[in-house]
Image (cartoon, rainbow, N blue to C red):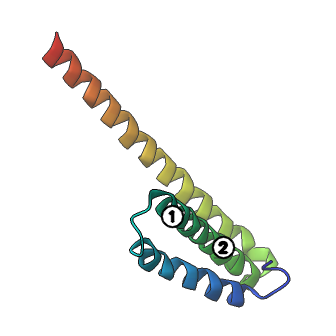
């Protein structure tokens, strides 16, 4: 859809949908409605990230495009390793507490 329309138009659409998600969440206490709105918001956030990256690649010249891709890959590797370290630390810490308190 971003190829058919411009990236700027799609960024406006996704930004509006991302900004409207908190207001739409406050409208109901129905669990199904809240889950649908949260999925809608997550798709909007992922679409925003993808559109921003595509806009960055589109605005750079072909010979320096790898300079834009490399820091992005490094950032995602760093972020995913940080998330995994937090996950492992939390699980190891909780299992150690169970061992200490229950044995």
Depth check, front residue: 44 or 26: 26
The quarter of the rendered structure image containing the N terminus is bottom right
Q: Is residue 74 left or right of residue 24?
A: right
Depth check, front residue: 96 or 14: 14
Q: Is residue 99 left or right of residue 41?
A: left
Disc 1 crowd, CA 10 A, few/some/many (<14, 14-19, 20+)? some
Which circle, 1 or 2, is nearer the viewer? Answer: 1
Percent across and percent down for residue 77 are: 55, 51
Disc tally is 2
* Image quadrant where residue 87 sits: top left
96 versus 91 height, above or below: above
Q: Name the residue at the right extreme.
A: 4
Cα–Cα gap, marks 1 and 2: 30 Å
- Helix, strand or loop status at disc 1: helix
Q: Is residue 11 left or right of residue 90?
A: right
Depth check, front residue: 69 or 8: 8
In the image, what residue occupies the spot 31% across and 28% down?
92
Q: Is residue 57 left or right of residue 21?
A: right
* Image quadrant where residue 44 sits: bottom right
Of the residues under marks 1 and 2, which one precedes in the sequence?
1
Q: Which mark is residue 53?
A: 2
The quarter of the rendered structure image containing the C terminus is top left
Percent across and percent down for residue 48 are: 61, 74
Residue hosting label 1: 33
Disc 2 crowd, CA 10 A, few/some/many (<14, 14-19, 20+)? some
In the image, what residue occupies the spot 26% across and 30% down?
93
């Amino acid at each position: 859809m971003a190829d058919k329309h411009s990236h700027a138009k799609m960024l406006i659409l996704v930004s509006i949908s991302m900004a409207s998600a908190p207001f739409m969440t406050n409208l109901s206490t129905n669990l199904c409605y809240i889950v649908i709105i949260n999925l809608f918001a997550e798709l909007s956030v992922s679409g925003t990230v993808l559109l921003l990256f595509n806009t960055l690649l589109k605005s750079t010249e072909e010979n320096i495009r790898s300079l834009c891709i490399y820091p992005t890959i490094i950032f995602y590797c760093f972020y995913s390793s940080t998330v995994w370290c937090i996950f492992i630390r939390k699980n190891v810490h909780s299992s150690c507490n169970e061992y200490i308190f229950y044995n």
